Amino acid sequence: MAKVVLFGDSYIKRLCFFCDERKGLHMPYNVKWYSQGGLRTDRMNTDLYGKMLKEKGDIVIVAVGGNDITPTSQPKEIVRRITEIVNDISRNGCEHVYITEILTRGNFSKCPGLQKIVFDRQRIKINKCLAKTFKNNLLKFPERICTKTKIRFTSYIE
């Protein structure tokens, strides 16, 4: 059975809880979850990162970058750090590494001075760079799914 490793921030953490409530993904994969709310690529939790690398997944899905966006962050630098993560995973023996695009969000209380318009402007630049860099290995989500879905994960946010 193939091993799928999901690594990332609170989106992955909430997805794990969501799937556990529904008794798994019902797919023929062994899924391993490595996530931390607030995870940033410039302040990586090295213990979590090391455990994820040791897992040696056949497929690794990485969802990071949204928490790196601040009023003064540089999209190219965030893309560079995401690329380093993908390269580390590939050097570790994983042939199938996928990156998720950064999704829009609405709560910026943990980042003083950040507003939605600034976040989205940087997010769009980062996603365009990720699309050029990773081509078919970028997982895209239609905006309407992200903004109109009725599923709420708020009870799982730490």
Image: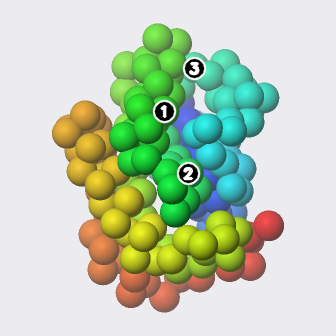
Whole-Å distance between the Cαs marked 2 and 1? 10 Å
| Picture coordinates of residue 49, whole percent (x, y) | 67, 30
Determine which residue is flagged by label 2: 68
Lower position in the chain sequence, tag 2 or tag 1: 2
Nearest to the observer: residue 136 or residue 38? 38
| Picture coordinates of residue 2, whole percent (x, y) | 48, 29
As drawn, is 63 to the left or to the right of 76?
Answer: right
Lower position in the chain sequence, tag 1 or tag 3: 3
As drawn, is 22 to the left or to the right of 63?
Answer: right
Disc 2 crowd rating (10 Å Cα; few below 14, some 14-19, many 20+) is many
As drawn, is 143 to the left or to the right of 154?
Answer: left
Whole-Å distance between the Cαs marked 1 and 3? 20 Å
Determine which residue is flagged by label 1: 81
Lower position in the chain sequence, tag 2 or tag 3: 3
In what element is the residue under mark 1? helix
Determine which residue is flagged by label 3: 56
- The three-letter amino acid code for the residue at tag 2 is Asp
| Above or below 152: residue 70 | above
Q: Residue placed at 56% from the left, 51% from the top?
A: 68
In what element is the residue under mark 2? helix
